[in-house]
Image (cartoon, helix red, strand yellow):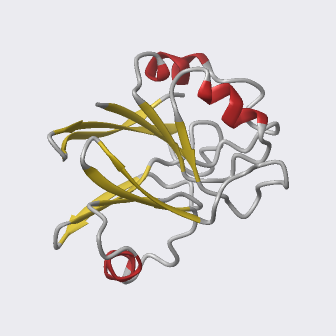
Amino acid sequence: MKVVVLSDTHAPRFWKTCPPRVVEHLRGADAILHAGDVCVGWVLDELASYAPVHAVKGNNDGPDVEAPETLELTLGGLRVAMIHDSGRAKGRLARMRARFPKADLVVFGHSHIPMDQSAGGLRILNPGSPTDRRRQPYGTLGLLWIEGGTLAEVRIVPVT
């Protein structure tokens, strides 16, 4: 199962339409996760034309973004939790384990800083932002390959 992970697309300020380098990764995806700050609901509709979308609400999302604050789901047997803001960096892994005790993977956004860490049977992933890189060298997204209920591969991919 191929899953594309996005966050902090910030439309329409930074995302006018799906960028071509993002589209390349969306083609053939089995699912799309968006960790918030979509900002406007039509982005989720645009993404849904590629694959089923699972999203959480970010602090900049407008009232037309219909998404919960947190989400827990199973993809290909992998237990995934999502939240926009995971809080400060110190203690993040332990805090996410306490918040989502059954999760194998927690996807989050907010900082625009791509990050992939794991400890104690939990992996946490921030895909960064494909459109608003802030002080990062590239805009990024995340790619997951799930096989038999486990993460076979995780990549953070530059798209700008």
In the image, residue 134 sits, relative to residue 60, either above or below, namely above
Give residue 116's position: percent from left, percent from top.
Answer: 32, 55
Residue 160 seen by the camera: yes
**Residue pictured at 41% horizontal, 24% vertical:** 29
The residue positioned 59% from the left and 61% from the top of the image is 110
Residue 141, horizontal then vertical, whole percent: 47, 38
Q: Position of residue 2 (x, y in %)?
A: 33, 30
Observer able to see residue 138: no
Q: Quadrant of residue 91?
A: bottom left
**Left or right, residue 8 beside residue 109:** right
Q: Does residue 121 appear left or right of residue 7 in this picture?
A: left
The x, y position of residue 41, in whole percent, is 77, 41
Q: Quadrant of the N terminus?
A: top left
Of 132 and 16, nearer the camera is: 16
57, 10: nearer the viewer = 57
Residue drawn at (57%, 62%) of the image:
84
Q: Nearer the viewer, residue 125 or 54?
A: 54
